[in-house]
Amino acid sequence: MPEEKLSLQELWKRVSTSDSGSLMKKHLTPSVYNRLKSKVTDYGGTLADCIRSGCMHLKSHCGIYASDPEAYDTFSDVFYPIIREYHKVDKLEHPAPDFGDLNNLGFGDLDPKGQFINSTRIRVGRSHANYGFPPTSTKEDRLEMEKMTVDALRTLRGELAGKYYPLTGMTPAVQKQMTEDHFLFRDDDPVLGDAHGYDDWPAGRGIFFSNNKKFLVWVNEEDHLRIISMQQGGHLAEVWQRLVKGLHALEKKLTFAHHPKFGYLTFCPTNLGTTLRASVHIRIPHLSKHKDFNKICEGLNLQPRGIHGEHSDSVGGVYDISNKRRMGLSEIEAVQEMRRGVEKIIELESGLKTKGKL
Ligand code: ADP
Ligand code: ARG
């Protein structure tokens, strides 16, 4: 969080006079700004709450967050075009959830010989219905949401059963180790901090682990919930089946915010819709050095990241490769898009390896 918060007028001046390439800067034209500057949602959310991070971090790609579930419509003049452009959809509509036939997925392990994939992870985000997002949540809201979530998590059985670890009281050493091991979220991302993501930190935040550490839930980080399934190796089907099982079990106890146009609602517009990111940590030392690596990923609708999460670097030719699109397609389609893309990446890496080419 900034020491002293800039007013909306100061934020606007900062971004409008900058050369920021963010979608927020592009779509918040002077006339849109003037139309929106005095609006307030029923949750008390303002335009300043939505654009603060993007104005403080001019290199943001998207640069806007929803202060609460109503913000998408209250500030539609800026959100709608951003959502269209980011998700590459003409129409603002999202299909009904479809998780596929779990007993007949048609895919299994993407790397049965263990030559390329270190681990596989799928996450979805969920927001509790009728609660604000970080800028409009109070400490009491966060604690209430944490309690609701933990009560629901306690009902999980079998492979999903586990334990909740609140951040309050966790030693810095344990927290650091869990983050390095790719289980826990970071607590030092200034982009999220300036979006109010760390307000009242660490109140109401924590992580749930199933006993086998393959099913996880992040509580009150960027989203109210991030539901995660992960394991070593490339068995995408097992990861997906576990995620869907866990999600359906939680849906029996909790009500999640859903929008007729945008599907499941998240704090950041880039995550709307399925809210799903399916990723592998994959060893691609040859392909990743290819001059067209980014273009190849783009063409496959894949997004490469470093292995310590968004905005981190690759280590030793290992990349986090995931589906890029989350809205305008169903959950199973998003997973299939990632599967097809990763299969192609493996094929290309194998070809380059055989030829000994870079
Ligand atoms: P998200 O938006 O999906 O939460 P981040 O990029 O912030 O993603 O990553 C969160 C954490 O999950 C990081 O520690 C990252 O290394 C880890 N992670 C992502 N994909 C995988 C994967 N396939 N295997 C292991 N860890 C992963
Ligand atoms: N606000 C940042 C940007 O615009 C992050 C966007 C996507 N990432 C996220 N964690 N929501 O670049």
Image: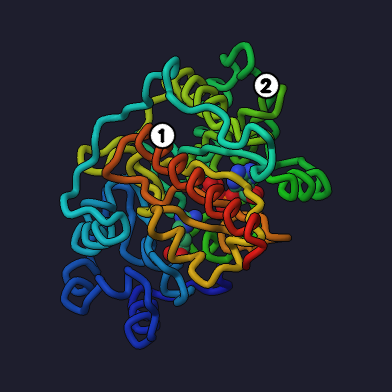
Q: Pointer 2: what residue?
A: 162
- Real-space Cα distance between discs 2 and 1? 21 Å
Give the quarter of the image for residue 76. bottom left
Q: Which mark is residue 41?
A: none
Of tags 2 and 1, the one toward the viewer is 2
- Name the one closer to the observer, 327 or 178: 327
Say which amino acid is labelled 1: His
Look at the image and tell me whether residue 353 can be seen. yes
Ligand 2 lies under 8 Å from the Cβ of mark 1: no
Q: On screen, 167 above or below 102?
A: below
Picture quarter with the C terminus = bottom right
Q: Residue drawn 39% across and 62% down?
A: 49
Q: Position of residue 283 (x, y in %)?
A: 66, 52
* Direction from residue 115 to residue 266 in the image, left or right: left
Residue neighbourhood size for the residue with mark 1, other residues' Cα within 10 Å, grouped as few (<14), some (14–19), many (≥20): many
- Name the one closer to the observer, 181 or 165: 181
From this viewpoint, which residue is outermost toward the bottom? 17
- Secondary structure beneath label 1: loop
Residue neighbourhood size for the residue with mark 2, other residues' Cα within 10 Å, grouped as few (<14), some (14–19), many (≥20): some
Give the quarter of the image for residue 131. top left
Name the N-terminal-most of marks 2 and 1.
1
Q: Which mark is residue 128?
A: 1
- Name the one closer to the observer, 251 or 34: 251
- Secondary structure beneath label 2: strand
Q: Position of residue 10 (x, y in %)?
A: 38, 80
Q: Residue drawn 65% across and 29% down?
A: 214
Q: Residue drawn 29% across and 40% down?
A: 329
